[in-house]
Amino acid sequence: MAQPRRSPHDYYETETTDHQAETEIILLKHIPLSPGSPSPLQRDAHLQFLVRNLIQGLPSRYISQDASQPWLLFWTLQSFSLMGVAIDPNNKQKAIDTIMAWQHPKGGFGGGPGQAAHLLPTYAAVSTLAIVGRPGPGGGWDQIDREKMYEFFMSVKQPDGAFLVAHHAEVDVRGTYCLLVTAHLLDMLTPELLEGVPNFIKSCQTYEGGFSSASQPYFSPEPEGPPTLLDSPRPPLGEAHGGYTFCSLASWVMLQPYLSLQEPSVQQPSLNFKTLLRWLVQMQGSEIELGGFKGRTNKLVDGCYSWWVGGCFALLSSLGIIGSHDHDHDHEPTVHQEDEAWDDIDDSLWDRAALQRYILCAGQHPAGGLRDKPPKPADSYHTLYCLAGLSTAQHNVFLSSTRRDAILGCWKILPESTQDQLRRACFTHSLAWTEEEGTSHILGSKSNRMNATHPVFNLTMTHTEGIMAHFYKQTIPPRSKRT
Amino acid sequence: MDVPTEEEHLLYSQRPEWADVLPLEQYENITPLAPIFYTDEYKDATNYFRGIVKSEEMTPRVLELTEDIIRQNPGHYSAWQYRYKTLMALKCPLDDELKLMDELAVKHLKTYQVWHHRRLLVQQTRNPGPELEFIANSLQNDMKNYHTWSYRQWILAYFNDDELWSHELDFVESMLEADVRNNSAWHHRFFIAFQSGVRNGDQDRDAIVRRELAFVKERIAVAPNNASAWNYLRGILDHAKTPYSELQAFVKPYSLPQPPFGTPPEVVDLEDPLPSKEAQLPCVAAIEFMADIYEEAGSGDLMKATELWRSLANEHDTMRRRYWEYRIKEASKTIKI
């Protein structure tokens, strides 16, 4: 393979080009001799890395993560799920007991026992319960206080459709994503909770196409009643960023059923998908960056954006923006060894093979675990988001109308439910995601294969179905082929 | 590692003045998964913090305790939250608190909480003046810090005071002077110029657009391979609903190879600066821009657009080959109609 071109600096060097050049020199050493044969996935080493953290514990430098204990557990256990590793009943129970110690008496979960409720750990705790929990006493699921959690959600809701991540804390679109995922999984959706949220998301889109962390609302005072929120100005605070873009776009996807139930006379907010798609593809690094993703313009590639940016393409497809061919039509399962064979089956607009190469060749730490980039150490955050990125690069997961119809056909109306339409629409929309048969493309050895992951929730389909069937009190029809 | 600053730092459990607080262990009767090996100081302080939260005590010693925890773990959002509630309950002088924040923000630049706590305090003091200088200094250490930039934008938007805004354009220009590729600074410029309403003296919106076009063109000329500047250019045009074709004369030389040394320019156009002699041409963003112009023109020009996209796909920007092929496919759909 010819040595790839260095990024041009126009002989006008600045801090940005200095950092870029340093990174390219390092990444150059990680380019595989043959593009189709990357370093194999060191599955055992990664498992050992995670198990060590889980069982033996984390060294004292992790004190900085003391308020993120639910995240540490989610990153670890979801990494197991992606690698197809089940957890033994004893450790499952330990996980459930640990998680339930984080529930706040006034609703929601905190970053550890006795910590204040916060949307981010609430999401991480509930998602982890989707992996390890079960119904019944001691199983976690039925010990979640959903009424109090709903009160907590409403107590952090702002007049512009944003949510504070915790009382007296910041507004941040990560909070919106975390709240929406939790409310979807636990059957807590109401129009009251969702009102104004689409417009808040829309206001975070920047001129570059990606999304910022938040926006600033302006209000005009009214002689009577609450002030009116102005459409403009409503500036995004902060530049387009991969993490916030994922949270915004995934939130937008989750809001589709709600939006489709609005009165036709109500004007629907819309996003600029043209600039968004352009920005997303621009985030993929060049050959010398091994096709890893960056999180912002003129910043460095980082393994975690494999998921935050790489994961956005499946979300875009579900909105009909790209890749609109009929995925329900089955492809013949085939084995693809050569790079060229991808073209027949892959209508994606980004380079899936290159991302796999980055993760395998630069993302893996030799001592186990995955990382931002060499020579950084591994951590559980990067381990999960590199593996989830690998999964999204390997599999096509799409919203299947066949699957949606099958789920709808089994829907049972609950006598006590007041929000049947919204609940049904969100339930079927969440569970219609299906892995396209025969189109997986695993770069390198077959043992590099990850399980497919839910493009919105980042849980396996099995875990998503399990927890949602329980909370919505529904029976989910079996999948027609493999699970 | 942060080491306690006092040489004889007694644990709270050893201090008689804390004897009335019942410390709470984190986990009782369970063995947690993924436990963190805490230092004795951290474990002790957080045990007392849990005790305080439970008893809902809000006294001056709570400020000492929460500061201690925050210094050991600035991401402990509950300690921040409880500290804020205590400051409010005690009606503490917030200038002292801001001084403490000056120190902590520099130490823990990448923590959400240090910046948010400042926001809460400044909303109380309603004195945003010193903040801009503090932010400017803080950006010297980390020119692309996301929190710092969003905090600056928040200060400007929230207080929305012309005096605060008066030097903002100079400020962002100096940041771009330091690094013309700093995308955070470009975003800030867009925020100032186009997204925060119309300020006194800025009522002539066409003049603002002209000013910004001139500014970004000069920056592109110096270093053409700079995605931030091109995105800014597109941002202006999209915002002003100006067709890209109006920039054709400027963009074209950037989409071509560097002319042989000594070639005199055909026309000297002061409004459309030429690429520097050092520029590595053709520039991918310029080729893309030209293709967009041709696509916009439609009909016969679509062939030219296709040719440019093909050159991106096969030669200049191969990582995005699929995207460029998609653009070709999408454009060809419009021909058939």
Image (cartoon, rainbow, N blue to C red):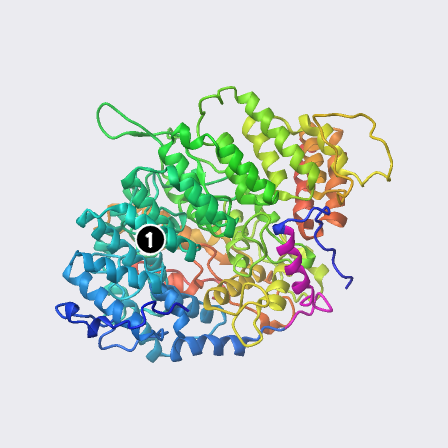
Q: Residue at x 41, y 29 (%)?
A: B163
As drawn, the residue found furthest toward the top would be B204
As drawn, the residue found furthest toward the front would be B7
In the foreground, A225 or A314: A225
Q: Residue at x 25, y 62 (%)?
A: B65
Percent across and percent down for residue B20 are 12, 68
Q: Is residue A235 left or right of residue A97?
A: right
Q: Residue at x 34, y 57 (%)?
A: A185
Dot 1 corresponds to which residue? Answer: B100
Up-down relation of residue B130 to residue A473 (above or below):
above
Q: Is residue B149 left or right of residue A105?
A: right
Up-down relation of residue B188 to residue B53 (above or below):
above
Percent across and percent down for residue B236 are 57, 31
- Residue type, numbered disc 1: Leu
In the foreground, B29 or B48: B48
Residue B278 is one of the magenta-drawn residues: no
The secondary element bearing badge 1 is classed as: helix
Identify the image quadrant of the N terminus of chain A: bottom right
Q: Visible in this render: residue A290?
A: no
Q: Residue at x 67, y 54 (%)?
A: A286
Up-down relation of residue B66 to residue B194 (above or below):
below
Tell me the quarter of the picture where residue A78 sits: bottom left
Residue A27 is one of the magenta-drawn residues: yes
Q: Is residue A25 left or right of residue B120?
A: right
Up-down relation of residue A399 to residue A126 (above or below):
above
Q: Chain of mark 1?
A: B
Percent across and percent down for residue A329 are 57, 54
Percent across and percent down for residue B248 are 71, 29
In the foreground, A360 or A365: A365
Q: Visible in this render: residue A51?
A: yes
Q: Which residues are magenta?
A: A17-39
